[in-house]
Amino acid sequence: MTPLSVKPVASTWCPGCGDFGVLAAVKKALIEVQVPQHEAVLVGGIGCSGGIHNFLEINGIHALHGRLLAQAVGVKLANPKLTVVAAGGDGDGYAIGMGHFIHAFKKNASILYIVMMNETYGLTKGQASPTAPIGFEGNVEPPFDAILTALSLPAHNFIARTFSGDPKTMTAVLVEALRFNRANQGYAFVEDLSPCVTYNDTFKDWRERVLDVSKLPGYDPTDRKVMFQLCLDTMEKGKIPIGVMHRPAPKTTDSADSLELKLLPDRIGPAVTGIELADNLAAYDKLIKSVT
């Protein structure tokens, strides 16, 4: 890939942070899918994980707290030819960003959202996040499960969960998600189990508990109901389901189209639309006549 003029900076993450696995997987996935650097945009959230775009030689935006999905969708609609990735933490996405998190599934814009989930607010010194288990730092609330929530929202989405302790599988999942996006198939959501080694080092526990649902009897990622039940059964046994949870069947109606295809069927967004007078004079005259 052709180098950009702005070089990435050295990472500020703690040694051993699970986010390094995500960074490596994103790099490898972008290269394998052959996304040109100038066509790749990564919108980062707030928190340790949200700075991931600073460590990549692609276009990056540091979004407002909890608003990275709104900005990522805006980028995609401005220029549908771009490959847009949003990346942040569970505190950013499932707390202040919860409204955008829910609506992203039904909007179904062809962007990839990666949530690095570690059950804590690492940047602000280890408070309990929405995914924290009962008892962690005085937390008394049951943890929020993003995968069960995602599976409960019927839409043409790609849904998966990965583990930073298995970067090879994570890369394969991100490659599939990016290809889903680049084919304008819709929204891809990948939650990565990314331990915070400083405030909540769960590497050993999660490595022992993760279970690839694709190896379970009855696995069918085209059926949300089946996958919801498989995930529940897995969790009730004390395991953490990982793998591809929803791989949509081929679209049968236009309602399953991605947001950019519904709004911009010609796949030309305002960022690449000609603004010269000669090209727009006919449309301008039509507008004037309609209001006079």
Image (spheres, helix red, strand yellow):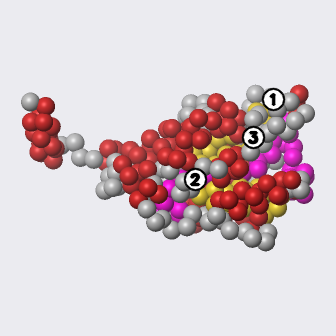
Q: Is residue 146 left or right of residue 8?
A: right
Mark closest to the chain's N terminus, 3 or 1: 1
Residue beneath disc 3: 144
User: Vertically, is 19 above or below 257?
Assistant: above
Report the magenta residues as a range. Answer: 179-208
Which residue is at a point 32% across and 44% down the rendered structure image?
270
**Residue at position x 67%, y 37% in the image:** 94
The C terminus is located in which quarter? top left
Q: Work out whether residue 196 can be spotted.
A: yes
- The residues bearing labels 3 and 1 have C-alpha atoms spaced at a distance of 15 Å
Specify few, some or many for label 2: CA neighbours under 10 Å numbering under 14, 14-19, or 20 or more. few
Sequence-earlier tag: 2 or 1 = 1
Q: Secondary structure at mark 2?
A: loop
Q: Earlier in the sequence, mark 3 or mark 2?
A: 3
Mark 2 vs mark 1, CA separation in Å: 33 Å
Image coordinates for residue 226, horizontal then vertical, percent = 70, 62
Instruction: Give left or right: position of 132 versus 280.
Output: right
Crowd band around label 3 with a 10 angstrom C-alpha radius: few (<14), some (14–19), many (20+): some
Answer yes or no: is residue 168 visible. no
Q: Which mark is residue 154?
A: 2
Q: Nearer the viewer, residue 107 or 110?
A: 107
Q: Amino acid at mark 2?
A: Pro
Q: Residue at x 44, y 43 (%)?
A: 75
Label of residue 127 in the image = 1
In percent of width and height, residue 173 lies at: 65, 62
